Amino acid sequence: MNILYVGDIMGEPGIEAVSCVLPEVRKQYKPDLVIAQAENTTNGKGLSRTDLDRLLRLGVDFCTGGDWSMHLPEIYDYLDDPSQPVIRPANYPEGTPGLGWKYIETATGSVLVISLRGSIVGKKAEDPMNNPLKIVDQILLENEDVQRDATIVNFHGDFSSEKRMIGYYLDGRVTAVIGDHWHVPTADAMILPKGTAHITDVGMCGTLHSSLGVKLSVTTKRWYDGHPSRNQLETDGPLQFNATLITSNSSHSATSIQHINQIIPAALCSV
Ligand SMILES: [Fe+2]
């Protein structure tokens, strides 16, 4: 099975990058399933129903979540509905709307997709999250007897130490553990010793010359004088598309992992 995981889609420039590159990538690699990190899709904060529909029309099959998943309440019903291809991190506290794992049926088999948030994520470090390791153990136990062809875990976190550790924690138990949230791709895509594919961070889809998709004029000033300021998305200049392609075998192990990075010159493509 070929599974493509597309990195954080950051606002309109992210949607534009996906629109420009994904059709070609689909043709070239023929993925059976395309999963994308969509928590930043709608103006950098959350995912609207309209933008979910747009991503599905562009060739995304399923969306994972992160620290912005709960920002737009209009998506809560979709997060709750097992038939809607979108989840939020599974380790939010009891009572949080939505599901943190769902199955998606593809032409070549059934895939369990799980989203987890790192224990500490930037300014949201005080959020009362459940322990991601204990939660993923529970999910895998609950689904132990469910027939499926692959299990993909998304780990949306800040600490590289935690993102590396969970790969090894789940090695041999799931097909892939894909890290994101940094918006910067790492060069460590690998198959771990017991057959799980892992990358610390996939990177993002959006503007290239920016600070994680945000205007450099805003972030530079913030780092220079320390005054809080509102993020403004960069919308000019070349775009970047980052994704990770995983191939798995009939025993659900990964057989290859490959990072895909494409730079799109400004104005080459528009939605
Ligand atoms: Fe995030």
Image (cartoon, rainbow, N blue to C red):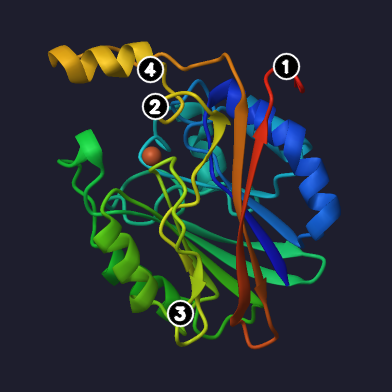
Q: Residue at the spot x=75%, y=32% of the render? A: 20
Q: Amino acid at mark 3?
A: Leu
Judge whether 96 appears above or below 74 on screen.
below
The residue labelled by disc 1 is 267
**Closer to the N terminus: mark 4 or mark 3?**
3
The location of residue 177, given as percent across then percent down, is: 46, 66
Judge whether 40 appears above or below 194 on screen.
above
Q: Nearer the viewer, mark 3 or mark 1?
A: 1
The residue labelled by disc 2 is 211
Can residue 63 be seen here? The reply is yes
The residue labelled by disc 3 is 192
- Dot 2 and dot 4 residues touching (CB under 8 Å): yes
Judge whether 228 appears above or below 129 on screen.
above
Q: Amino acid at mark 1?
A: Ala
**Closer to the N terminus: mark 2 or mark 4?**
2
Label 1 and label 4: CA atoms lie apart by 20 Å
Q: Secondary structure at mark 3?
A: loop
Label 2 and label 3: CA atoms lie apart by 31 Å
Q: Secondary structure at mark 1?
A: loop
Q: Is residue 137 left or right of residue 41?
A: left
Q: Residue at the spot x=39%, y=71% of the render? A: 167
Q: Amino acid at mark 2?
A: Ser
The residue labelled by disc 4 is 216
